[in-house]
Amino acid sequence: MTQAQLGEACGLSQSAVSRLEKRGSSQYAMDVLLRMSQHLDIPATLLGLAGPTVQARIGTESVERRQFLGAAAAVAVSPALAVVAGPVDEAEQQAASLRLVTTSYRRLDGSTPSRELADAVRSHLRLIQGLVGTAPTDVHRIRLATVASEAASLAAWLAWDMGDHGSARSFYGAAIKAARSGASPLLAAYQIGSLAQFEAHTGNGVQALSLAERARSHLAPGSPAVADAWLSAVEALGHAAAGDQRAADRALTRSRAAVRAEPGAEPPPWP
């Protein structure tokens, strides 16, 4: 369906549809979003819209695009919902649904300014952290903690991108703590390595190398080769930040060797 065809069906110009697809900063009335959801057969709740009892009064209301950012991202990956719609337990279903939202935000990060995403991601993280605190069973808590780690890591990256280094460190710390609570050594290695990468880019080479060493301590025998390759690259950044060119070169050589050891390896087992 072209933008013009969708606009004609929903009473919008082609340029208005284009702006909506590009996640512009304009405001969009909820009745417009409702017409689009009905025409495309998208459940209204995925667009952040209320049920029929409330939809009757939304004609004159409008909300900022950011309020619908998470919901719009969910629509973009709605076919993936079928993956978690099977006969799984409640804990797995909830964790999978929350992870889908985090994944959606990660995809939006490539085309949306960090400042426009940050508030939504932080709200999403607070929701997950609240659910972790009220989880009815240990299994439920562990699964949610892993999801919380992934969301905290994304919040850290957005803060880093905005130059808010204090918040970035805080969120990376939360990501590491949650990964450990989620009993996921490989994810903990990734989060500690991400903090190491951050420290290297901010010029703290010694701290970056110390964190990279900590990250390696979480890699169990048989961990994916890509984990070793990535950590070697992070170590190269640390050595570069410390001004040690030869050590940086050696770390990059180790990284290449790890990649070549498994040319047909699966994609990285982390966000």
Image: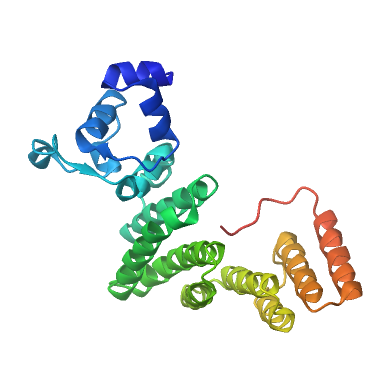
Q: Residue at x 54, y 73 (%)?
A: 165
Work out whether 250 lies above or below 55.
Answer: below
Q: Is residue 249 left or right of residue 205?
A: right
Quadrant into which the C terminus falls:
bottom right
State the residue at coordinates (42%, 36%).
Answer: 79
Residue shown at 31% from the left, 68% from the top = 131
- The residue lying furthest to the right in this view is 246
Q: Is residue 59 above or below residue 226?
A: above
Q: Quadrant of the N terminus?
A: top left
> Which residue is painted at 35% across and 70% down in the image?
129
Q: Where does the image place residue 264, in percent across and percent down from the top left?
A: 77, 47
x and y percentages locating residue 6 in the rendered image: 35, 20
Relative depth, front residue between 246 and 271: 246
Is residue 93 left or right of 174 when viewed as pictured? left
Q: Horizontal and vertical percent for residue 231?
A: 73, 68
- For the residue pair 14 and 188, the one nearer the viewer reads as 14
Seen from the viewer's position, the closer of residues 54 and 189 is 54
* Corner quadrant of residue 36: top left
The mark tally for this picture is 0
Left or right: where 103 falls relative to 29: right
Residue 5 percent location from the top left of the image? 37, 16
The coloring applied to the image is rainbow
Figure quadrant of residue 77: top left
Looking at the image, residue 20 lies above or below residue 7: below
Quarter holding residue 256:
bottom right
